[in-house]
Image (cartoon, rainbow, N blue to C red):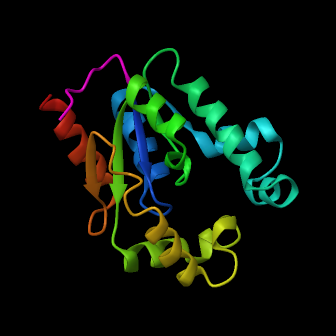
Amino acid sequence: MVEFDKSRSIVIVGFMGTGKSTVSRLLSERLGWDRIDTDDEVVRRAGKSIPQLFEDNGEEVFRDMETAVIQDVLSGSPKVIATGGGAVLREVNRHVMLQQGWVVSLTADRECLISRVTSASAAGTRPLLAGDAEARVHALLESRRNAYDFAHLTIDTTNRTPLEVTQYLLHTLKDF
């Protein structure tokens, strides 16, 4: 286990639906740190939604923008950073996260993730789930099975609320 260094950003990674955005918001409020969601920053820079970016430019262009955002936001003062679920697929992203941040991976079981990402509020916002969302979740989970294993800390969010996850994370950080 790597000791938590308060001068480094906290980077939250995990599959879609694990709670990265909500937990990062709660954590930043409690720490008094700025918060950046890399998906939101990509949208801001691209001037279009992620589904539109995928449609117009393809996943590779999105991933290139995501990499640039991750490198940019990890510089400067410590902040809480929520990444997109696929940000860990590129070695360069994992490397910079480990070098400049303290990485927390959020996980959840398949059934929980399927329920979360196929909810009405998530409909239409996840281009990688186009078509049979349940089958896509299974396929993506399988292809990313070990992608999040590089994190300094892993927290299972299956039976925890975002507030419980945040409190657990704060308690864990306090122990360092």
| Residue 54 locus on image (x, y percent) | 78, 57
| Residue 56 locus on image (x, y percent) | 87, 56
Is residue 169 left or right of 129 when viewed as pictured? left
Q: Main secondary structure of the magenta part?
A: loop
Is 107 in the magenta? Answer: no
Residue 152's image quarter? top left
Query: From which residue to which does the magenta span run?
Result: 1-9
Which quadrant is home to the N terminus? top left
Which quadrant is home to the C terminus? top left
Going 19% across and 26% down the picture, which residue do you hit? 3
Answer above or below: position of 118 versus 166. Answer: below
| Residue 61 locus on image (x, y percent) | 76, 46
Is residue 68 left or right of 101 when viewed as pictured? right
Answer above or below: position of 100 versus 144. Answer: above
Going 61% across and 24% down the picture, which residue do you hit? 72
Residue 9's image quarter? top left
The extreme right residue here reads 56
Is residue 158 left or right of 74 when viewed as pictured? left
Going 67% across and 46% down the picture, which residue do you hit? 63
| Residue 6 locus on image (x, y percent) | 29, 20
Residue 4's image quarter? top left
Count every numbered label the image shows and give the total. 0
Going 35% across and 49% down the picture, which residue do you hit? 105
Q: Nearer the viewer, residue 74 or 142?
A: 142
Q: Nearer the viewer, residue 71 or 117?
A: 71
